Amino acid sequence: MKEKLDTILREGTEKIAAAKTAQELQEVKAAYVGKTGALTEILKEVPRLPAEVRAETGRAANQTKQQLAALIDTRAEEIALKASEIPADFDCTVPGIFPSASRAGGLHPITQMCYDLNDAFRSMGFEIFQENDISSELYAFDNLNFPAEHPARESMDTYWLAGRENERGGTRLCLRPHLTGASVRYMQTRKPPYRFVYPGRVYRNESTDARHERAFFQYEALVVDRDFPFASGEILIKSIFEKVFGRDVSVRMRVGFFPFVEPGFEIDMACLVCEGAGCSVCKHVGWIEVMPGGSPHPNVLRAAGLNPEEYTGFYVNIGLDRLVMMRYGIDDVRLSHSGDLRFLEQFT
């Protein structure tokens, strides 16, 4: 019996090493350690062997089975890795072969809108700034003049990282609920005056619908200088819209409250889906809110190390997803985040 087991181990090892594909390896596995394999048949014979050799033969057979099983697992990994290797003679310049007509890739409409905004702001002397998706209570709320009891701090709005629930300030981490905290971080590490934008994804614990997503894109801009007329903020907004949409876009500013600006405004643009006639996107009023804006609150400037008696400026926090809806007449923001190729192929 020992000679038979040695033969099975030797032959099995050779065939495992010779297997080139997963199918060939599966056939070797079935032949040796499968339900009807050679080792399985030997294990079935063990109870009928003389008592003095039964235990030793059973141990030897099981050991052989374990050795072959380990070799099979190792070879399976090698075959899988080999399958993903690029041959040395592979020509990456040869066009791919598709079952139907070739499909060209393209930028996602949100990415394209972001690039267009970058170009527009760069033409006016703005710097592009980015930061990590993980922020803290210090930058997301404290530095932005949010009261300690503000509801946006609670988990119903903000995704707090587990394990930091009992901490406060800079050590209480979260997925950034807005981009505005980046403005203080930027100003703390640079000297005024400031003229910069910072695009990125933000995260909020809210219900999704045709106009809202849990993870969406914003595009924030900030100007801070010793003498920046407030009226220049509206001119800035209209200039950006004209560059992005290629035409004049009606804009209105309504008084609104946001902790980080004083005075603050809700900034609306005429709905381009219905051309102001009223539709489900604009809730049949002809206008759609695309950004809050206003002058940085004195406490925000202080957090950045500036004297609010000397400096002022203008914030805008653009809803990037909504601008894409306006540009292409999209009536449901969820389409942009669906990954549905039927939707995305329209923009290639």
Image: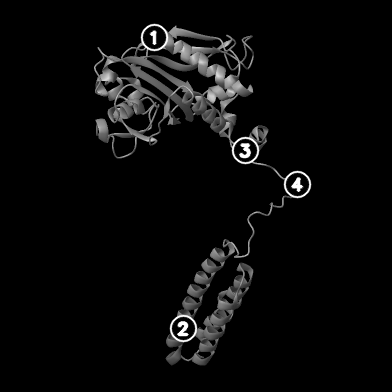
Report whether 304 appears left or right of 54.
left
Residue holding disc 4:
100
- For residue 246, which quarter of the picture? top right
Residue 12 higher or lower than 244, as above or below: below
- Residue furthest to the right in view is 100
Q: Position of residue 209 (x, y in %)?
A: 54, 24
- Identify which residue is drawn at 51% across, 27% down: 119
Give the structural element (helix, strand or loop) at label 4.
loop
Q: Amino acid at mark 4?
A: Ser
Q: What is the spatial separation of the Cα atoms under label 1 and label 4, in whole angstroms?
A: 56 Å
Residue holding disc 2:
58
The disc placed on residue 230 is 1
Mark 2 or 3, which is nearer the eye? 3
Q: Amino acid at mark 1?
A: Phe
The disc placed on residue 106 is 3
Q: What is the spatial separation of the Cα atoms under label 3 and label 1, in whole angstroms?
A: 39 Å
Q: What is the spatial separation of the Cα atoms under label 2 and label 3, in whole angstroms?
A: 63 Å
Residue 347 higher or lower than 54, as above or below: above
Q: Amino acid at mark 3?
A: Gly
- Identify which residue is drawn at 67% across, 32% down: 346
Mark 4 or 3, which is nearer the eye? 3
Q: Position of residue 222 (x, y in %)?
A: 39, 21
- What crowding class fits label 4: few (fewer than 14 Cα within 10 Å), some (14-19), or many (20 or more)? few
Color scheme of the displayed model: one colour
Residue 265 higher or lower than 70, as above or below: above
Q: Earlier in the sequence, mark 4 or mark 2?
A: 2
- What crowding class fits label 3: few (fewer than 14 Cα within 10 Å), some (14-19), or many (20 or more)? few
Residue 122 higher or lower than 37, as above or below: above
- For residue 325, which quarter of the picture? top right
Q: Earlier in the sequence, mark 1 or mark 2?
A: 2
